[in-house]
Image: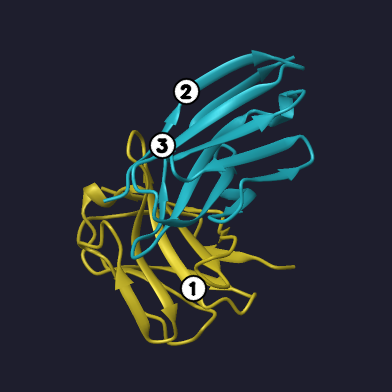
Chain colours: A cyan, B yellow
Amino acid sequence: KQEVTQIPAALSVPEGENLVLNCSFTDSAIYNLQWFRQDPGKGLTSLLLIQSSQREQTSGRLNASLDKSSGRSTLYIAASQPGDSATYLCAVGNYGQNFVFGPGTRLSVLP
Amino acid sequence: EAQVTQNPRYLITVTGKKLTVTCSQNMNHEYMSWYRQDPGLGLRQIYYSMNVEVTDKGDVPEGYKVSRKEKRNFPLILESPSPNQTSLYFCASYPTRYTEAFFGQGTRLTVV
């Protein structure tokens, strides 16, 4: 059964820093991986979707990479801003199970 | 505007009183799912549907029912709610299993 972990569980950084969030999964038989952002009391917003055949995706200051063979993905946030403060979730699209989510990384960017 | 709409957003109910949480999407997506989110446990899938009249269990289906009579709607039914079903519930839709998922705003359910 697929298991997804995220490190760190929480992260606090000063504004302007570049940072990396990590996601690991146990079963490499995935068809995609998606990164989401969740703000308190709100739903999930999709940030980036990487298909299993792709190595990375970029959107603005965000870059997500995928190494399927090693079961890892990273989300890189450049020049962080206070507005980036949120919980970041990764979810793997798994044959037979649909999406399996990680527990999330809670990010605080301090002004 | 493309969206997934859940109702109600907040609900407090008593043990055993049947309730339905509605979910509607306006994107003509085939796939829809229900998740619950609990502290320390993350998001777990309850049920999903691949198309009209096609549904399957997720990881935590006990105590829940779903139906998919129309493509746009995927209600979550709790026939006899219990306090351990107190949670934050999310509905999601996506065009196919290989594409981006769109989530509703969530329904915070409290069962007393």
Nearer to the camera, B105 or B10: B105
> Element type at marker 3?
loop
Q: The residue marked by circle 1 belongs to what chain?
A: B
The residue tagged 2 is A8
What residue is at 75 percent from the left and 14 percent from the top? A111
Q: Which amino acid does label 2 sit on?
A: Pro
| Percent coordinates x, y for residue A52 in the rendering | 53, 55
- Res B88 seen here: no
The residue tagged 1 is B31
Q: The residue marked by circle 3 belongs to what chain?
A: A
| Percent coordinates x, y for residue B62 in the rendering | 20, 62
Q: Which mark is residue A103?
A: 3
Few, some or many residues within 10 Å of mark 2 (<14, 14–19, 20+): some
| Percent coordinates x, y for residue A83 in the rendering | 73, 30
Whether label 1 touches label 2, CB < 8 Å: no
Whether label 3 touches label 1, CB < 8 Å: no
Circles 3 and 1 on the same chain: no
Whether label 3 touches label 2, CB < 8 Å: no
Compute the Cα span from label 3 to label 2: 10 Å
* Residue A9, image quadrant: top left
Compute the Cα span from label 3 to label 1: 23 Å
Few, some or many residues within 10 Å of mark 1 (<14, 14–19, 20+): many
Q: Is residue B23 above or below residue B84?
A: below
Q: The residue marked by circle 2 belongs to what chain?
A: A
Q: Which mark is residue B67?
A: none
Q: Which amino acid does label 3 sit on?
A: Pro
Q: In this view, does A9 lie above or below B37?
A: above
* Residue B78, image quadrant: bottom left
